[in-house]
Image (cartoon, grey):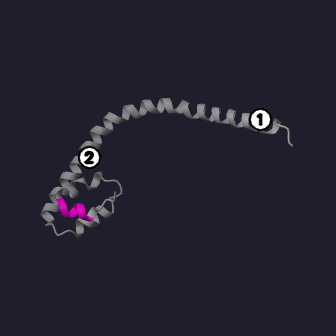
Amino acid sequence: MDFDAGLLMARQPKSFIIGVRFMYGFRLTGPVRIGASRLPPSILIGLNMLGTLLFVLLGYFVGGLVEPLLHSLDQHIKYLFPALATVAIIWLIRRLLLHFSQPKH
């Protein structure tokens, strides 16, 4: 499925202006597309301010909710990588020992 920013801007210009901050990969192309639209500057400024406010508030509150979860996840991950490395080293040593212990024909 292709995503066409021009089509979205043509169909829903107000939603596009408010939501461009939330769309990954549109930090550069979104404002260019918005600037090329024929919407009056007063509407652009108002919608841009609304989008900014939503982005900041959602980022602040969602970030506050997610941060403790990520911190507790970090406490578990720091033990996961050494455990996986140990398993990988044991597997590699076992494989090498089996390979070199087999008689050659």
Residue linked to disc 1: 98
Q: Is residue 83 left or right of residue 44?
A: right
Front residue (pair 43, 95): 95
Q: Earlier in the sequence, mark 1 or mark 2?
A: 2
The overriding secondary structure of the stretch rendered in magenta is helix
Q: Is residue 55 magenta?
A: no
Indicate the amino acid at tag 1. Leu
Amino acid type assigned to the residue bearing label 2 in the image:
Val
Give the quadrant of residue 103.
top right
Locate residue 92, reporting x and y percent. 70, 37
Q: Quadrant of residue 29?
A: bottom left
Q: Nearer the viewer, residue 37 or 65?
A: 37
- Residue range of the region highlighted in magenta in the rendering: 6-13
Q: Tell me if residue 8 is in the magenta stretch.
A: yes
* Residue at 17% across, 56% down: 47
Query: In this rendering, which labeled residue sits more in front, label 1 or label 2?
Result: 1
Q: Is residue 37 above or below residue 58?
A: below
Residue located at (28% from left, 41% from top): 60
